[in-house]
Amino acid sequence: MAELHKDIERVVLTEDEIKEIIARLGDQINHDYADKNPLIVAVLRGAFVFTADLMRAIKVPCAVDFMAVSSYGDGVKSSGVVRIVKDLDTKIEGRDVLIAEDILDSGLTLSYLVDLFKGRRPRSIRICAFAVKDIPNHTAAVVPDYVGTHVPDEFIVGYGLDYAERYRNLPYVGVLKSEVYS
Ligand code: PRP
Ligand code: MN
Ligand code: MG
C-alpha cells in the first residue's frame, strides 16, 4: 500500500481492489465483444488512467480514441454545462463504441456524450464506468452497461480523478479532506 497522501481523509479503493475491478470488467467485455472490434472512447482527462488499465485487460481486437470534456473545472461542483475540449478523430459510424469513464456522478457528462454520439450513427454504444457515485434519491439519466464499483457520495480523488487538476496520480481512490477545498 502506497503511503497515504496528507490531503486524503481515508482510502475508498486500494490498488488491489482496483486491480480486481479491472480484471472483472475485462472478463465481461471480452465475453460480450468476443466477435467485435470495439472502439474504446476514453473521456479525458479523468478516464485516462482507468482506460490504460482497462485496455490491457481487453483481449479482443480494439481501438482507442479520446474525447476531452470538462464540466467541473477547478471546483467540487459541476458547472452544469459540458464543454468539449477535444473531439474524437475517429469516425464512429457503424462502430461498436464503448465509452470508458472514470466516474458517473450527476450523469451529466455521460448523458451528453451518449446523445452526441447517437447522432453519429454508431452500431452500438455502451458505457463502462469505473465508479458510480451513490447519491441518495437520485436516478441518473444514464445507466452504465458495465460498473466497476459504487462509491459514497463524497468528493473523491485519485486514479485519474482530480480536484483542481491535482491528485490524479494517486494509485488509489480516496476521500479528499474537506479543508482542502473549503
Ligand atoms: C469529472 C469526471 C467525470 C464527470 C462525472 O470530469 O471525470 O467525467 O466529472 O461527473 P458528472 O456525472 O456529474 O458529469 P471533469 O468535468 O472534472 O473533467 P476531468 O475528467 O478533466 O477531470
Ligand atoms: Mn471527466
Ligand atoms: Mg475533474
Image (cartoon, rainbow, N blue to C red):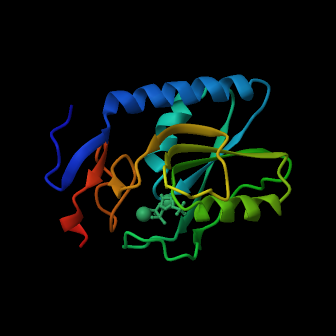
- Tell me residue 19's x, y (percent): 41, 28
Q: Is residue 144 left or right of residue 3?
A: right
Q: Nearer the viewer, residue 137 or 81?
A: 137
- Tell me residue 62's x, y (percent): 67, 35
Rendered-image quarter of ligand 3: bottom left
- Tell me residue 46's x, y (percent): 45, 55
User: Is there any visible trace of residue 72 in the rendered image?
Assistant: yes
Q: Residue at x 55, y 50 (%)?
A: 101
Q: Is residue 90 left or right of residue 80?
A: right
Q: Nearer the viewer, residue 14 or 171?
A: 14
Q: Residue at x 40, y 51 (%)?
A: 160
Q: Nearer the viewer, residue 34 or 82?
A: 82
- Tell me residue 16's x, y (percent): 34, 27
Q: Quarter of the image for the C terminus: give it.
A: bottom left
Q: Is residue 15 left or right of residue 109?
A: left
Q: Is residue 28 left or right of residue 130?
A: right
